[in-house]
Structure formats: C-alpha cells, structure tokens
Image (cartoon, rainbow, N blue to C red):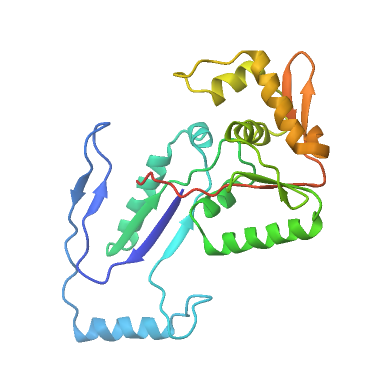
Amino acid sequence: MSLAFAPARTAPAPVRTAPSQPGAPLRSVSISPRPASTPSTDAAAEAVRSDAPRVRAVPEGTEARGFVLYVGIDETKATQDGTTLHRIVEALRALTAEVAPSAETYAAVALAPEGAGGRDVDVVRLALQDPAALAKQRRDNNDDADRHPNGVIIDISRKRVLLDGEAAGLTYKEFELLQFLVLREGRTIDRQELIENLWDADDEAPSERTIDVHVRRLRSKLAHYQDIVRTVRGIGYRFDRHADVSIRQASTPSPDLY
C-alpha cells in the first residue's frame, strides 16, 4: 500500500471520506479556503520558508511537490492488528487533512504474487514502480547473472526460464506449474492442490496421473537442473532452490485505488 501526498497549488479540493454504510458511495466534504493573507502573514511565511532547510536530495532548480509514504502490510497482518487496509488509508488521510488542509492525497494498493517472499515494504515499492527499488532490483539481477552465468534463472516477471543463458522453452502450463511450486518454496504441494489451482473450474479436471505427466515433461526441459522439482513420495512435489538458481519476482502495479 502506498500513499502519495502533493500540496495543492489551487483552491483546496474536496476531501473524500469513508462511506457511512458498506457499499455506499464516498461522500465529499468541502474545506473552506483559508482567509486572505495579509502583509504580516506573508512576511512570516517568507521567514519560515527562508529558515526552513531544503528537503534532502532535492537538486537545485527543482522543488518538492509532495512525498510518498510506502506502507508494508498485508490483509492478514492488518486483521491481526484489528484493522483493515481501508481503515489505515482513511486514518492517514484524516491526519493529513488535519495537519495540512490544502494537501491532496492519492492511495493505491500494491499487488504481488501470492507467497512472494521479501519484506512487505520492499514488495510494495517494487509493485508501485519506485525508481530506487527498481534500480536495486536491476543491480541484484545483474549480480545474479555475474554470479551464476551457467545457472538457472526463473524469471516470473517475463514468464521464462533460462538454463545457462538459453531459454528452456516451457509451455504456458509447464511454466505455471513451475511458478506455483517456486512461489511456495520449501512446501510440498499435493497433486490435488495443483489441479484445483492450475485448471479452471470450467475445464475438464485432469487426473493425478496427468499431473505426473506434466511434471515429467517439465523436468525433461529443465535438463540437468531437473532436481529443483523434487518428488516427495506419496505426497506430491516441492521446489528446492540450489545455489545456482536465481528467481526474479514480478512487480505488478495495482488496479485497485482507495
């Protein structure tokens, strides 16, 4: 979840408040503009501006127009804290309106693949395309390529697998199968769970034997790295990461706005 705050340069915009009943439309509450400034207030404001330090990392010739606050928390953790993402957003908006009535706010939910690893706030920054986070990801990916020129790269963002720099040529279903195991690294997945999650309800459900066939074909394309997909006898399959395996996570901007 991310909030972007930008000070208004025109008349204050209406502040959207939470609906009184679930499903009700958001209400708009207008904020009265501030009284016209006087010479004395203008002088005081100018003194504050001259004494205030510049915002860190703002180059000469530019001005700060707002800031972004990244909040890393998923719905499960919010529920454990006795709240929801929506309530957190509304609380921050209310605080902003109280501290700076002329500020405008914008909030978006960050989406990530289920089971994606890493700190929540780092996942949020990547999903919302934070330039510094993207630059770090590029550096890490380049480091991975330098460290593992002859290894496996499972690129979830581009839905491809590279083996020693060459594409493995997986089918869509084979990649979906591998991705499902990768995102649940270390956990054994039984065949029925794979069927329920990788085949639509409208499709004819495959048998557990069909899953074994898909896994066998996947392994054959992984060649000498096929043991990253391990069989747990009598249960199912598990992804085992080796030292020569790199995983590149997806970063998906959220279509959900608060």
- The answer to whether residue 210 is left or right of residue 241 is left
Q: Nearer the viewer, residue 179 or 174?
A: 174
Q: Nearer the viewer, residue 167 or 150?
A: 167
- 123 lies above or below 175: below
- 53 lies above or below 250: below
Image location (x, y in percent) of residue 178: 66, 34
Residue at image coords 70%, 20%: 212
Q: Is residue 18 visible?
A: yes
- The answer to whether residue 1 is left or right of residue 116 is left
Tell me where residue 188 sits by quadrant.
Answer: top right
Q: Is residue 187 visible?
A: no
Residue at image coords 82%, 45%: 243
Residue at image coords 52%, 75%: 56
- 231 lies above or below 81: above
- The answer to whether residue 184 is left or right of residue 56 is right
Q: Nearer the viewer, residue 15 or 217?
A: 217
Image location (x, y in percent) of residue 81: 50, 35
The total number of labels drawn is 0
Residue at image coords 67%, 14%: 209
Image location (x, y in percent) of residue 48: 37, 81
Q: Nearer the viewer, residue 225 or 38?
A: 225
Image location (x, y in percent) of residue 72: 53, 47
